[in-house]
Image: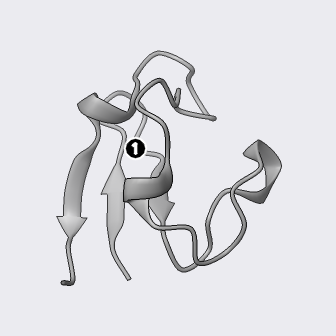
Amino acid sequence: MSRFQCPQCGYIYDEQHGCPHEGYPAGTPWSAIPEDFSCPECFVREKPDFVALDVNP
């Protein structure tokens, strides 16, 4: 499982945990998140802005 961080506020999307509040259950891969996904914490950055922290094949 991989993690991706918002460069604006530091929110981390962790594939293992997903983002249930936004409709993405645990185990949802980053590749399944739409390109217009906005950071659920700051709402400033979108998916293309996120930085990969640890990517597992």
> Compared to 12, does 25 lie above or below?
below
Q: Is residue 15 left or right of residue 46?
A: right
Would you call the spot at circle 1 few (<14 residues within 10 Å), some (14-19), or many (20 or more)?
Answer: some
Q: Is residue 9 left or right of residue 18?
A: left
Residue at image coords 67%, 75%: 26
Report x, y in % for residue 8. Answer: 35, 27
Report x, y in % for residue 42. Answer: 56, 24
Report x, y in % for residue 3. Answer: 35, 67
Report x, y in % for residue 48. Answer: 27, 31
> Compared to 27, does 52 lie above or below?
above
Say what amino acid the circle numbered 1 marks: Gly
* Snapshot quadrant of residue 56: bottom left
Residue at image coords 69%, 56%: 24
The single residue placed furthest to the top in the displayed view is 44
Q: Quadrant of the C terminus?
A: bottom left
* Snapshot quadrant of residue 16: bottom right
